[in-house]
Amino acid sequence: MAIYDTLGATYSRTRQPDPRIAARIHTALGDAADVINVGAGTGSYEPARTVLAVEPSQVMLAQRPPRSAPAVAAVAERLPLRDNAADAVMALLTVHHWSDLAAGIAELRRVARRRIVVLTWDQRIFRERFWLVREYLPQAAAFDDTRAIPTDRLASLLGGARQEPVHIPHDCTDGFGAAYWRRPHAYLDPRVRAGISMLAQTGDDTLAPGLTMLADDLTTGRWHDRHTDLLALDTLDVGYRLLVADA
Ligand SMILES: C[S@@+](CC[C@H](N)C(=O)[O-])C[C@H]1O[C@@H](n2cnc3c(N)ncnc32)[C@H](O)[C@@H]1O
């Protein structure tokens, strides 16, 4: 069973594509006439020129909006596609879930004629700059240490790639790990945590002491005293990166 058959039941509730991140992805895709989305999930960020979505989880496939691009149940490591199948291939917030990263990236390179776009994060920056994992939930950071892909390794597997920082807006509509960096109360909401694999897979029992501490600090105002600087920012670089490779 695909892992998102368990994790993804409420994905579309908290994970709506953010238009500012969409604009960055669409710019990175350049003038590609057709796009294949690998690890496509519910279809976030797919431009109109998407010709196929590849996604292993039936639970995720079932949440794709009506009239979105055709989708096939398959994994990145074995794409059911011919060589050079589309101008561009994108893989967004997915490579850390793959069981064989090198095989999956080799498949992206096989099917992309011109461009590959990968959205991921730099775990060293994330650990250092994101208060939630640094101060409250180090267990979640430790879990991510086991699966985060160093961006330089990814770039090398891609045969070279430009790495572009993606700053996260304070009101980001896609509720991934650090999306709520300026809305700390959100992390106390189990529906929000269910949409963040780093938290859902670490588990509430392990997270409980840190969440209690966060709740206390929000009640007493300690969190706000410590993070006044964040409240003045509209975007933050928490380590998310777009890797853009020419095939
Ligand atoms: C965090 S979701 C991201 C979905 C979508 N790209 C987005 O940006 O909303 C990760 C997705 O990767 C998929 N996935 C996990 N293992 C995969 C694999 N080996 N090949 C392709 N996709 C995979 C999951 O099923 C899930 O839909």
Image: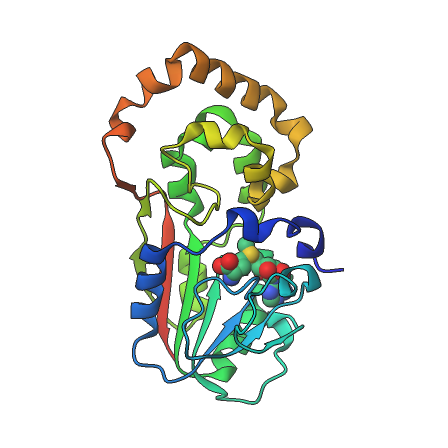
Ligand 1 quarter of the rendering: bottom right
For the point 65% across and 30% down, the residue is 204
Q: Nearer the viewer, residue 43 or 146?
A: 43
Q: Is residue 100 visible?
A: no
Describe residue 209's horizontal placement relative to residue 230 as left or right.
right
Q: Nearer the viewer, residue 2 or 154?
A: 2
Q: Nearer the viewer, residue 135 or 90?
A: 90
Farthest top residue in view: 220
For the point 56% across and 35% down, the residue is 140
Residue 189 in the image: state x and y as whole percent.
55, 31
Residue 158 against residue 220 in the figure, above or below:
below
Coloration mode: rainbow
Farthest right residue in view: 1
**Can you say which quadrant of the picture contains the N terminus?**
bottom right
Farthest left residue in view: 232
Q: Is residue 83 visible?
A: yes
Residue 86 against residue 208 in the figure, above or below:
below
User: Exactly how many numbered labels are in the figure?
Assistant: 0
Residue 12 in the image: state x and y as whole percent.
56, 53
**Can you say which quadrant of the picture contains the C terminus?**
bottom left
Q: Nearer the viewer, residue 192 or 67?
A: 67
| Residue 192 position by quadrant | top right
